[in-house]
Structures are given as structure tokens and as C-alpha cells.
Amino acid sequence: QVQLQQSGPGLVKPSQTLSLTCAISGDSVSSNSAAWNWIRQSPSRGLEWLGRTYYRSKWYNDYAVSVKSRITINPDTSKNQFSLQLNSVTPEDTAVYYCARETVAVAGTCMDVWGQGTTVTVSS
Amino acid sequence: EIVLTQSPGTLSLSPGERATLSCRASQSVSSSYLAWYQQKPGQAPRLLIYGASSRATGIPDRFSGSGSGTDFTLTISRLEPEDFAVYYCQQYGSSRVTFGQGTKVEIK
């Protein structure tokens, strides 16, 4: 059974860096059939995909245009986890942040396992 | 970026009734890349349907998905008390992911 466990601070000051980690159990961050995503949710923006990292003989990243200049998602193979860093945060970045596994099945692609969510507030 | 528009915003129904939720895309979406999720308050989204019409593991057969191109539908044949929640469609396209704004199914 695959599980994702999120960790990281719930309060970040404006202009600083938001950092979250998602620890994977039951699967590998280096899997050739999965991708590892970060999504956030706020009342004003709904569910917003931020980006993903995945391994297909080498590491790849895809990022949402809205955060591309500020975001980094990194795998950590030694700890079987992946991380989110979002720089120069503003109160608009206040949201519940989720990590999720994306898998590719014969019938389609989907996010079948989600972390528990981390509420992050950007405030001084 | 592909925009997904869900309708209606809110659906007020009674247990036992049929729910029909719509998801319309701003451009054509491969059926392989269209999924539906259910979310209850305080919980993460839960995968219901992937590939437009395939039920995820453990999802009851009262949930079904259909559609192609730009128009997709999630149908709940007979609403159970635990089905009252918010439902989102999601698509993958050009290495980017977008979600619809959600349809809330509430008890009438």
C-alpha cells in the first residue's frame, strides 16, 4: 500500500521560501511508471497543480507557468522522498499543499495516491 | 493551457436520486488524460475515475464516467449519503495539469 507523508512548516514569512517534503512508502521516487506531484488548494484559486518530478532514465521536471520562476521540485533518492521549494512567497501563496503520485495505467493517467495535506500560511 | 469548466456549480439532490456532472474543456482532451476526483471537507481529493470511464480501485459501480473530446460527464446513478461532496475533473495536456473549479453535490 503506497502512502505519502508530508512534512514542513505551517507558517512562512513574506518574501521567504516555502519548503515541504513528501516521504514515500510502498513505492520508489525513481519508479519508471510514476511521477511525483505538488498541488495546492485555496478558496480563491481552487485546486492548482504546481509541478512534478519523474524518472525516465534521467530526471525530468514540469512546472506550472504561474510559478515557474519561483519553484523547484527535487527528488531525494537516498530518503525516497521529494520536496517542494517555492521562493519569494506572498500571502497569495497561502493554501493547503498536497503531494500526489501520478501513475500511468493502460486506460489512462491519474493521481491515485495523495498526501494528507499541509496548511501553509504566509504572514509576518 | 486547457481550461476545464464544470457545471453546475452546485447540485441539490436527495439520496437515491441520479446526479449528472459536466466537465467541458476549452480544447480537445485525450480520454486517457481525463480523471474525476471526490473531495470531502478536510480531506485530500480521492480518485474516482481515470481514462474518462475507468473506475479506480474500490470505487462503487454507481459511479460512471463518459465522454470524449471536449465534453465529459460523471454520473452517480443513485446517491448514497456518503456521496455528498465536491467533485473535480482533471486533465493532463502538454505536460501540464489543470483542474475544473468543482461541482458541489449537496443534500436537498
Image (cartoon, coloured by chain):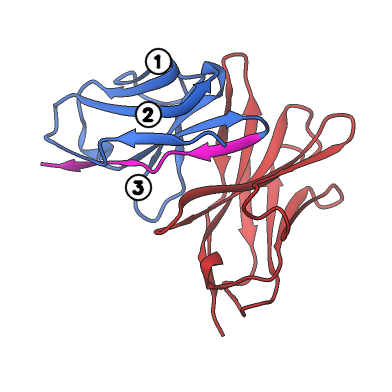
Density class for disc 3 (Cα within 10 Å; few <14, some 14-19, many ≥20) is: some
Give A25 or A45, whichever is nearer the viewer. Answer: A45
On screen, residue B6 versus residue A92, left or right, reads left
B97 part of magenta stretch? yes
* Contact between labelled residues 3 and 2, with CB atoms less than 8 Å apart: no
On screen, residue A57 versus residue B14, left or right, reads right
Chain letter, disc 1 residue: B
First in sequence: mark 1 or mark 2?
2
* Contact between labelled residues 1 and 3, with CB atoms less than 8 Å apart: no
* Contact between labelled residues 2 and 1, with CB atoms less than 8 Å apart: yes
Disc ID at residue B40: 3
Amino acid type, label 3: Lys
Chain that the image shows in red? A
Residue range corresponding to the magenta coloring: B96-108
Query: Magenta stretch mostly in which secondary structure?
Result: strand
Write down the residue under mark 2: B23
- Distance, label 2 to label 3, CA atoms, is 19 Å
The quarter of the picture where the C terminus of chain A appears is bottom right
Farthest residue to the right: give it.
Answer: A57
Q: Residue at x 64, y 47 (%)?
A: A64
List x then y, in percent, for residue B3.
48, 36
Chain letter, disc 2 residue: B
Chain that the image shows in blue? B
Q: Quadrant of residue A56?
A: top right
Q: Do labels 1 and 2 share a chain?
A: yes
Give B75 or B82, whichever is nearer the viewer. Answer: B75
Chain letter, disc 3 residue: B
Write down the residue under mark 1: B67
Q: Which residue is drawn at 33% across and 18% down?
A: B61
